[in-house]
Amino acid sequence: MARSNNINRQSKSKNKKPKRLRKSSFNKITKSFQVFNNDSDHYNKYENLTLDVSDSEDTSTLPILSSNNSSSATLSNEIPSVDVFSSDNEDVAYEMNSKDAMKNHLELNTDFIPFSDDSEEEEEDDLIVENTNVEEEAEIYGNERSLNNDYPWLLNHDHSKQRDIIEWLTLEIKDFVAYISPSREEIKLRNKAVSKLGRAIKELWSDSELLVFGSYATDLYLPGSDIDCVVNSASGNKEHRSYLYELARFLKKKNLATSIEVIARARVPIIKFIEPESGVHIDISFERTNGVEAAKLIREWLDMTPGLRELVLIVKQFLTARRLNDVHTGGLGGFSIICLVYSFLHLHPKLRTDEIDPLENLGVLLIDFFELYGKNFAYDEVALSFISGYPSYMPKSNWGSLPPSRSSFTLAIQDPGDASNNLSRGSFNVRDIKKSFSGAFELLTSKCFEMDASTFKDRVGKSILGNVIKYKGKQRDFKDERDLVVNRAIIENELYHRKRSSSYFDDDLFLDPSADEALVGQQDELELYSLDQPVKKKVKKSTKTLRKLKKIKQEAQKKEEKPQKSIDSFMGLSDDENNGDSDSKPKPQHNTKEDKRALQTKTVDAQTRRDYWLSKGQTLASPTIPKKST
Ligand SMILES: Nc1ncnc2c1ncn2[C@@H]1O[C@H](COP(=O)(O)OP(=O)(O)OP(=O)(O)O)[C@@H](O)[C@H]1O
Ligand SMILES: [Mg+2]
């Protein structure tokens, strides 16, 4: 029955004139997408958009979207009639042509690209305090090794009845993000760790403060992510190695650190350790504020880019499971991942033209992300640029200060805070990163076709996302409790920026030591909401510090409401032909309720969905797609 419906839909669509892109819109969009390889092995959906100059205003046929309307088209088993399996020499050759092959592939975990464990540690000889206490570690990590299940985000979340396969993937992504987002206990543990360390630093060096940056200060951390901190002092001298050792000894004496490493001779000297109470890995660097600045910028990006947090967390977990997330071994660091996803979302044609809601199309976007950076992106030629914080593609040749590298096949991401810094210069293993993205594109797309061709009975308990994401760790509770407990790193980062900005400098917002002490003293009182009454605030009465926090929160909310400039000209979509101008800014993506409502009324027609899957089927170039069971 389902099969005959599909066939009917298909035959109807044959009589229907496909909607075409207006030529001017097409030109503008493609102009901003001159980032693809000339690699003829890979079908590039953007190059194959048909033009119809006589057509009207309609720009809704870019084949990259899904719809909220799950009642209309599902995949057709006849669409991806591609009979040649091609695999370029950089891509993993997936010799699979059936469900079984796919299963075997996963069981063998052949898309896992491990690094050898013997990679040289440049600062190995700097290890000063070692002797990890194995029992202590075991206690900290508890049952971390006792696994529940490879896809724990699916527990009680079966989406196999979704008619629209891509919606199934979107729902799984949301489940995964909810699954790995922090609970109140986790946030409190991190807050407490940061407080204790901050106090210790002040005790040791009264002219110094500890600031947090990196993923804890942006809410982009996975359960196992480290906390990045920096010591800033009035004297500005704490980067000297003698201070690093002094701090390491002090923290050890105070039982605030185990497994300490002092890495004094690196370009960025740091000390690394585990904070025993939380078990969290901590990195402390010295006398640099660029990370603290970046944290604020990233939070602004998150505010104006729905879907950024979700995709960053998925890509992070994807790379972490493949050990491709560690810059020391050539992998992609957290900041580079954020930049890749941020620029992908802002330069995506369907998001640029406001035609889809990113949060309702996470599945499509994830597949497109893997396709772009796994198949299409011209690594040899193109750099990502963030002039004034806004993303664009830039020919590498235009980046005058880009340091020369041995190979042209490198990732070049301009640091938004320092245009001469290539953020991803350490990610020398671009080949494996690209391979893994390309493999993920193929696995996800194949699985979508396979699931579409399966009966509902065969789909039960299956995962689409699980084909590329694995999560191994302690059972978690699907509790994203970030709204219930203040993230101290974010608040303090805001305070830091207020303090630095003279226009905001007033008595009430001054981050004085007593305010800090008040925060520390009320560590357990940082919860502003109760679980039972999420809306009603449980602000602890009349504490000066919490009033300050509230004020900061309100200011942050006000900021969200401020009007944003359009990025049309930036992306070559406006009429003023200002393509790539650095002073044009991204428009907010559906931040207001009205925007969201407007989007929900937008439906995507079946033909567009068919075009989307046709392009993916061609890209996939899989030899056979399993027939739908009747
Ligand atoms: N190559 C770099 N150049 C400049 N700053 C960098 C660079 N790499 C990292 N940073 C700074 O350090 C911060 C933390 O980087 P990191 O790679 O640990 O990312 P993260 O967001 O903390 O991810 P994770 O959760 O994996 O630790 C970044 O936000 C950025 O401010
Ligand atoms: Mg980090």
Image (cartoon, helix red, strand yellow):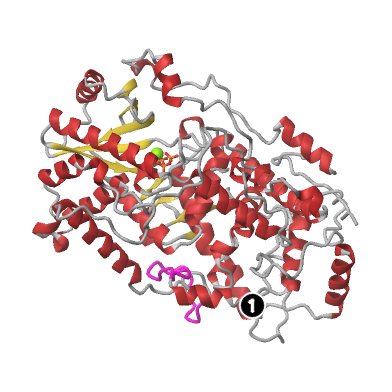
Q: Which residue is mark 1?
A: 59
Q: Residue furthest left?
A: 507
228, 516: nearer the viewer: 516
Q: Residue at x 61, y 80 (%)?
A: 24
In percent of the image, x 71 and y 75: which residue is there?
605
Q: Is residue 605 magenta?
A: no
Q: Is residue 515 above or below residue 240?
A: below
Q: Secondary structure at mark 1?
A: loop
| Quadrant of image for the N terminus | bottom right
**Residue 408 x %, y %:** 56, 43
Is residue 117 among what the camera can see? yes
> Main SS type for the magenta part?
loop
Q: Is residue 580 magenta?
A: yes
The residue nearer to you, when weighing 312 against 476, is 476
Q: Residue furthest front?
A: 532
Looking at the image, which residue is at 38% across and 72% down? 564
The quadrant of the rendering that contains the C terminus is bottom right
Q: Is residue 407 visible?
A: no
Q: Is residue 189 toward the left or the right of residue 164 in the image?
A: left
Q: From the viewer's side, name the closer residue of 278 and 501.
A: 278
Above or below, 522 against 345 in this view is: above
Mark 1: which amino acid? Answer: Thr
Determine which quarter of the picture holds residue 257: top left
Q: Which residues are magenta?
A: 574-591
